[in-house]
Amino acid sequence: MKILPVKILPVKILPVKILIDGLDALGVEHDAHTVHCFMVYLDELKKWNKVHNLTAITDDAGIVTKHFLDSLLYLKVIEPDVHFIADVGSGAGFPGLPLAIVKPQFNVYLIEPKGKKAAFLKHMRRLLGLTNVTVINKPVQQLSEYSLFFHVAVVRALFTVEEFIKLLTPYMKSGGMLILSKSSPMNYAVEGITITEAIIPQTDIKRFLISKIIQFPLA
């Protein structure tokens, strides 16, 4: 009797291992559901990217490290008891969606003015059942209803420090924190900022998290 070869379905062993090792390195609690959410996110990002050009990074390992784990570096400076977080210019959901996946106690607002990217964010919110995520399809300059609302605002290299402070201060609670991630250290002519150096797990890529506490009245 002829024995037919068994077809073995591909398993995402490599990205799963990179993700789990990275979460462990960052001290982020996770379970099978957490890993499943990230793998679904990975697949959907690659699928939508073929049509909507959401990211220049297309390999599994690169997406896990340079998007997912990079996004979670913000946890090094975000206080664990904050409630309302704004992800400004969220794009394909970084860093907001990874933060929402691993920290369901955070209420994450993904602010994205481009309709196609906002549609992807809404799709991921529904698909992953992330009830702690709100997608706002508006420019950050048009958020008057969120005045003095956010505890934390984050961005990935979209603005200068000065621009980010000017744009987001009206939406921050007193004592709220602004956080930007940059790829290189610089001398910033801004008072009261703190720079935290971090390395993306499973890589040698450095990030510099620039944070500032907003206090009212402003000096």
Image: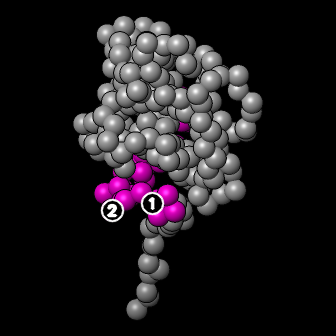
63 with respect to 127 (left or right) = right
Residue type, numbered disc 1? Gly
Residue type, numbered disc 2? Asp
- Residue placed most toward the observer, 21 or 175: 175
* Range of magenta residues: 23-52
Residue under the image location 32 percent in, 42 percent down: 81
Residue 20 x, y percent position in the rendering: 46, 63
Residue 115 visible from this viewpoint: no
Judge whether residue 204 is colored magenta: no
114 with respect to 187 (left or right) = left
Circle 1 SS class: loop
Name the residue that disc number 2 marks: 31
Residue 186 visible from this viewpoint: yes
Residue under the image location 33 percent in, 30 percent down: 84
For disc 1, the neighbor class at 10 Å (few under 14, some 14 to 19, many from 20) is few
161 with respect to 84 (left or right) = right
Residue under the image location 49 percent in, 58 percent down: 26
Name the residue that disc number 1 marks: 27
